Image (spheres, rainbow, N blue to C red):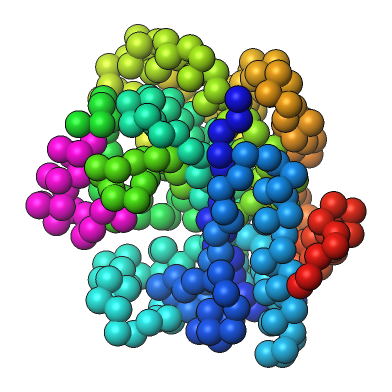
Amino acid sequence: MLLSKGFEVEMFTGTPQGDVVGLSDKVVAALDGFVREPDSRNVEYTTAPSYTYEQLLCDLIKPRLRLREYLKTLGDYTIIPGSTLALGGSDRFYRSDPNNPYHEYIERTYGTKVVTASIHINVGIADPEVLMRACRLVRVEAPLYLALSASSPFLDGRVTGYHSTRWGLFPKTPAQVPLFESHAHFIRWTQAQLAAGTMQNVRHLWSAVRPNGDRRPYNLNRLELRICDLIFDPITLLAITALLEARLLQLINNPNLDPLVASSLRAEELSQLADANEAAAARCSLEAELHHWEDGREILARDWIEELYKGTWSVAKQAGFSCFLTPLRKLLEDGNTAQQWLKYHQHFDIQTVLTQATQSAAAAELAITEKTCQPLAV
């Protein structure tokens, strides 16, 4: 049994040297499938739900190739890896839609803290109570996915001290989100937030993970993991997704993995532990000292991920996607994007790091296309 999966991919546009330039109005007008974010320096595309990783790989690559080709018609522009305004520009918001009142609220309330790039991983789960159980487990393990994906150690031309500056500064909203004990609990809580104004609308739930669907909070059909930085390499993204899917399959087969069942901690303690772990992972990613949700014991993020990898391998193998899980070993050995960039920065300035990363990303996408996704009309 495989679960359906899809991605929302937010990216910055700009020069090959890493300078971010707002082009979303032109992109959205010219290319189907791309939408605007509140700031014009971001564009987003969404992949259709798919059960197979081979299809997901091509669905991730194709829109980027179209976007790259179009950006060339505008000048010397490309897509920039990373999740923050690494070289500068966080002093000003560039509204993509000046007449949108929700965008006005976002700019006024949060400023450029929300001007980031990220990846949202959506996994289909139709039963609302199973979905709530899945959200509980993923909420307490979300810091591990952040640790794997961290790609934003720079902001405004400096090293910030975070591996994920994006999540370290991001204004999670509402500030406190509980572990939802049931679908009814989620409905009641959402209604209360809307009434209190802590959420402006049903989309205004910016937490590490959330239940999603066509008519929130009532009709739900998927889990949305929102904590990850932009994972630019598609192979790495699929490996992280494979870990998530295998973990969810474990939970579906064994409901006792539910933190409300398997933990010695109370629900309120679990949500506090998850928040503290998120903060630690934002700073140190794979080297973060976390506390395990089962009993609060200390554990290094890298070691915890290794445990999950070993524990989910047989599940992934049985379901036929273990080959997509294996790149996690290399990620754990080599470090995530943030760690690699910081290592490179010991010898080169930040702009050189960004320039090299941008060139490498474009070359890698072409190589994958030629090997896997042909014939392909761009």
Identify the residue at image location x=38%, y=82%: 97
Is 125 left or right of 32, judged from the image as shown? left
Main SS of residues in magenta: helix
Identify the residue at image location x=58%, y=56%: 47
In what quadrant of the picture does the N terminus appear?
A: top right
Is 252 left or right of 324, judged from the image as shown? left
User: Which picture quadrant has residue 223?
Assistant: top left
- The answer to whether residue 126 is above or below residue 31 is above
- Whether 169 is among the magenta residues is no
Q: How many marks?
A: 0
Identify the residue at image location x=72%, y=59%: 61
Query: Which residue is nearer to you in this view: 375 or 305?
Result: 375
Is 59 left or right of 156, judged from the image as shown? right
Residue 309 in the image: state x and y as whole percent: 67, 23
Q: Is residue 162 visible?
A: no
Query: Which residue is nearer to you in this view: 323 or 142?
Result: 323
Range drawn in magenta: 185-203
- The answer to whether residue 93 is above or below residue 120 is below
Residue 180 in the image: state x and y as whole percent: 27, 30
Residue 200 in the image: state x and y as whole percent: 21, 60
- Whether 193 is among the magenta residues is yes
- The answer to whether residue 350 is above or below residue 3 is below
Identify the residue at image location x=25%, y=76%: 101
User: Which picture quadrant has residue 316?
Assistant: top right
User: Which picture quadrant has residue 294?
Assistant: top left
